[in-house]
Image (tube, helix red, strand yellow):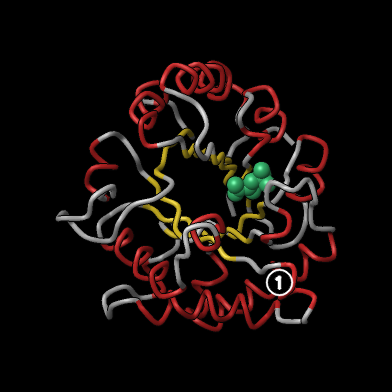
Amino acid sequence: MHKIIAANWKMYKDRTQAATTAGELAAVLPEILPAGREVIVFPPFTAIESVARVFDGKKGLAVGGQNFYPAPEGAFTGEISIDMLRDVGAQWVLAGHSERRHVFGESDELVARKAVFALSHGLKTMLCIGEKLEEREQGSLYAVLERQLMAFFEARPDGMAGETLPGRLAIAYEPVWAIGTGKVAGPGEVREAHGVTRALLERFVGDSGKKLPILYGGSVKPDNAGALIALDNVDGLLVGGASLEAQSFLQIIGA
Ligand code: PEP
């Protein structure tokens, strides 16, 4: 399976800063990006267009939106639509990032509805799942991942069969306790969670579940990226803090 290395720039960088970092990536990646690797950058909304312009026509580089509201348009003050994201060059969206779930209170049901909406309206979707520390300590890893994935797979309309998902849906496993904390999950923990996720994907969509990439996210840095991406069922990385500087993100991409 090809590997996806994604950068979540969260609420960092204005347009100039984003275009500068994107330019540093675009200057070298088309030559050095290993075959079968894809890079996606999720900038803040105001910088999506600047990054999309820099990436335009560069093989293996894509841009996405960190959030959106699941309606075509309407009286939703402060929200942004899938068509608006596409209009500024986004090819991907994130759904269910742990900061959306736990800082902004997005429920499994809303996250599922958003992922279904984005896919139905033609944007590739990275659905983020992951347990909180207390859930892991209570032995609820399986139950949490099952609940989060089931919400999405059960919300799908009839036309969104499993076979239609590879190539446009990616899963990001991000243990909440490892995001932005400097605590990376150990190889055993990542192997276990990705194995559980793979088994659940196969349960929900059969063989198509083998073809859905599962990214790991949570304090990925240049010095741990190589070991993480080599683990079974780790088909990519979703990187926050260490993606903000081009040099550090380039080291992760090449790991
Ligand atoms: C993230 O934002 O998805 C993330 C994994 O952040 P960090 O790499 O900073 O832990």
Residue shown at 52% from the left, 31% from the top: 12
The amino acid pointed to by label 1 is: Gly
Identify the image quadrant of residue 115: bottom left
Residue 113 as seen in the image, left or right of residue 141 = left
Q: Nearer the viewer, residue 245 or 105?
A: 105
Identify the image quadrant of residue 58: top left
Image spot of residue 154 (x, y percent)? 40, 82
Q: Residue furthest left?
A: 74
Which quadrant holds the C terminus? Answer: top right
Q: Residue beneath label 1, please?
A: 195
Q: Is residue 169 above or below residue 139?
A: above
Residue 237 as seen in the image, left or right of residue 153 = right
Residue shown at 56% from the left, 17% from the top: 24
Q: Is residue 113 above or below residue 202?
A: above
Image spot of residue 252 (x, y percent)? 70, 35
Q: Is mark 1 within 8 Å of ligand 1?
A: no
